[in-house]
Amino acid sequence: MIKEENLVYRRTPLMTDATLSYCPGCGHGTVHRLIMEVVEEMGIQQDTIGISPVGCAVLAYDFMDVDFSEAAHGRAPAVATGIKRLWPDKFVFTYQGDGDLAAIGTAETIHACNRGENICIFFINNGIYGMTGGQMAPTTLEGMKSSTTPYGRDAMKMGPPFKITELIAQLPGTHYVTRHAVHKAGLVRKAKKAIRKAFEIQQEKKGLAFIEFLSNCNSGWKMTPNDSNQWLEEHMYPFYPLGDIKVDGKLVKDVCKDLMQKSPVTT
Amino acid sequence: MKELALMKGNEAIAEAAILAGTDAYFGYPITPQSEVLEYLALQKPEERTGMVVLQAESELAAINMVYGAAGTGKRVMTSSSSPGISLMQEGISYIAGAELPCLIVNVVRGGPGLGTIQPSQADYFQATKGGGHGDYHLIVLAPASVQEMADFVDLAYELAFKYRNPAMILSDGLIGQMMEKVELPPQKPRTSEFDQSWVITGKRPDRERNIITSLNLDPELQYEHNLKLKEKYNRMSEDVMFESLHCDDAEFLLVAYGSSARICQKVVAVARGRGQRLGLLRPQTLFPFPTDELARLAGKVKGIMAVELSTGQMVEDVKLAVNGRVPVYHYGMPGGKVHSPDDVLEAVEENFIGG
Ligand SMILES: Cc1ncc(C[n+]2csc(CCOP(=O)(O)OP(=O)(O)O)c2C)c(N)n1
C-alpha cells in the first residue's frame, strides 16, 4: 500500500467521469483540471458558475463539475456579466479560446474588462481555431500555416497577430493579468497558483482577473504532441512571453512596447 | 387609491418593469425606445427595488447579459427597436433553445436596414416566426395603448415563466412615444423565491449540476428537444388573447393589432354610423395567434381585411386561419407613414362595400 504522505497524484474530485473530448497532449484538459483543483481547495463549488465558449471547450460543462452556462461564440464575458450582476457573491468564470475571445468576442471582452466586471477570464491561446479544423486565429503568428492561410499568415493581408492580453491589461478595470503555459510540470504549478490568485481577487471583489494560457494544438498544427510543445516554446514564447503583465492593478511591464513588437516570421 | 399617471408608452414600460419586480435590465440606446433606459436610470431602481440596470456596449452584449442573467431564474429584460432587435437575434435563438424566461421589448420602427425612426409594424414576421435561426417561437404580446404597455410587462413575465420561453412585447414608435393616462399596478417584490430545479446558483450537494445550454450534438437529442419545444408552442394556444369589437353581427371584419387597431377602432365607429356592419378583431397575442377565433368568424362574415403598418405580414396568418373560406385583403402603410381612419375607410369601401 502507498502511504498517504507518499501520494503525489490523485484524480481531481471536481472533474467528472466523462471522457475528455480533447486531443491527447492538448492544454485544455490540464487547465480544466487546475481550475477544478482550485475550486475544490477553496471549497467554493457550491458558489461557482462557469461559462463555456464556442470552440473546442464548448463541452467544458461535461468535464467540470460545477453549474455552467454555455455562451454563444464570443459572448461569454457578456453572459458572465449578466450572471455576476445578479449573483455578486458567487464565483463566475469564463473559459474561452482565442477565436472566441479575441476575434468574434473582442467587444464583449474589452468592455467586460473595461467595466472591471468582478469575474475571472481564462483564455486559451493555441494560435488557431481548433474546433473548426485549424483555421487562422487572431493569434496565429506571421508565416504560420493554417487551413485558411495555407501559405502562411501574411501580415500585409491579414494583419499581424493580436495580443489582446497586453491590450486589456491597460484598462483600469483589470486587476490581474498574466500569461502562463501548461505543458511542463513546473509551468502547471505556476499556472495553478495564478488561477488561485484570480479566484481570490474575485473573492475580495477587486476587479477582473485575466489569465492567458498558451497551449499547443497538435492536431491543428499538424505535429506530434512533443513537437508541438517544442514549437510552442520556440515560436510562441518570443511573441507571447510568459509571466505577469499586471499585478494588483499595476502594470509590471512595458505593454506598449510589447504591443508594437513585430511578430517573428515562422515557417 | 389607484395610482394614475400621464406617461409615454416607453416610460410606462420602464415604470411597469420596476413595479413588476424586474431583477435586471440590460439595454442599448436606439430611437424610438431610448426613454426606457433613460427613465430607468433616472429612477434609481437600484435604490427603489435593488434592480440592476446596465447600459451594454451593444445589443449583442445586452441580449447575452439577459441570457446569462435569465439563467439565474430571475426576472430579466431588455428593450430595443428594430435594428437593435435584429442584432439580438442570435442571442434570442440561444435563449429560446435553452428555454430561458425573459422579456424583450421591441418598439418597432420602419425598415429594412436603418430605415426610419417613424412607427411601423414591419417586424411582425421576425417577432412571430422565430426571427433567429432554428425552430422556435417567442410569446408575442401586442399592446395598443400606454395602459397595455404597462399591463403587459407583468403578463409577459408570467407567460415567460409559465412556459420557460422568451416573451416579446411588440410595440411601435407610435405607442412608445405617445402620452396617455395609465393606471399603475402596486409594487411587486423582486424575485425572492423561484424554481431552483433548473437555475444556475452553484452546484448544491442536494442536486445534480445545472447547465444552461442550447447544444445537443447528438441529433437524436436535438430531435427530441425540437419536438418538446413544438409541443410547448402548441400548448400556448390556451393563453391566446384578443379583443372583439362588433364582431357578433359583422358582415365584414378588420383584423388589426397595436397602433393600427387604434385607428381601426375609429374606422369601425364611422362605418357603423353609416349603417355598415363592420367589426374588428384585435389580437393581443400575436403568438399564439387567435387562429380559432378567426376561423370561427370566417364562417360568419363576407370578407376580412388585415390592416397593418407594413406591406402585409400578419395578413398571411389571417389567410392561414381563414383557409380560403372568404376573401382576405390587406391594407396598410409601410415605411413609417401611418394610415388615417379615412385611408382605411376608403379601402373598406373599395374591398367590401363597392367591390
Ligand atoms: C456565430 C458563430 N460563428 C462561427 C462558428 C463556428 N466556430 C465554432 S468554434 C470556432 C472557432 C473556435 O476557435 P477558438 O476560440 O480559438 O477555440 P479552440 O477551438 O481553438 O479551442 C468557430 C469559428 C460558430 N459556432 N458560431
Image: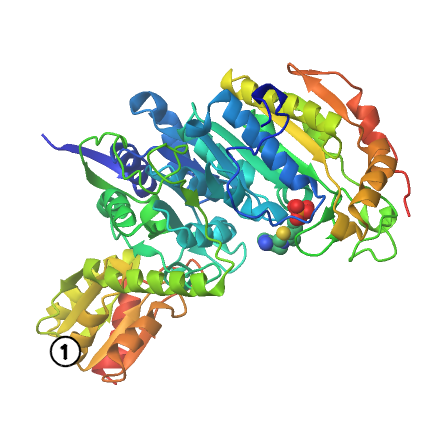
In this image, B331 relative to B265: left or right? Answer: right
Is residue A173 placed above or below B226 in the rendered structure? Answer: above
* B244 on left or right of B70: left
At 82% from the left and 27% from the top, the residue drawn is: A258
Q: Quadrant of the C terminus of chain B?
A: bottom left
Residue A106 seen anywhere in this rendered image of the structure: no
Q: Nearer the viewer, residue A112 or B338?
A: A112
Q: Is A195 situated left or right of A148 in this image?
A: left
What residue is at 16 percent from the left and 69 percent from the top? B279
User: Vertical placement of A204 versus B164: above or below?
Assistant: above
What number of labels is visible? 1
Closest to the observer, A118 or A202: A202
User: Residue at (54%, 54%) from the top-left corner?
Assistant: B114
Percent of width and height locating residue A192: 64, 25
Mark 1 CB near ligand 1 (8 Å cut)? no
- Across and down, in percent, residue B331 comes to 33, 71
Identify the subunit bearing mark 1.
B
Q: Residue B306: in sight, yes or no?
A: yes
Q: Quadrant of the N terminus of chain B?
A: top left
Disc 1 crowd rating (10 Å Cα; few below 14, some 14-19, many 20+) is some
Q: What type is the residue that disc 1 sits on?
A: Glu
What x and y, as percent, mark residue B68? 45, 39
Which x, y percent locates residue A8? 64, 25
| Residue B82 vs residue B307, the one in the foreground | B82
Nearest the eye: B58 or A227: A227
Locate residue A88: give its quadrant. Answer: top left
Which structural element holds mark 1?
loop
- Looking at the image, is B209 positioned above or below residue A8? below
Colouring scheme applied when the structure was drawn: rainbow
Residue at x 25%, y 70% (from the top left corner): B345
Residue that mark 1 sits on: B251
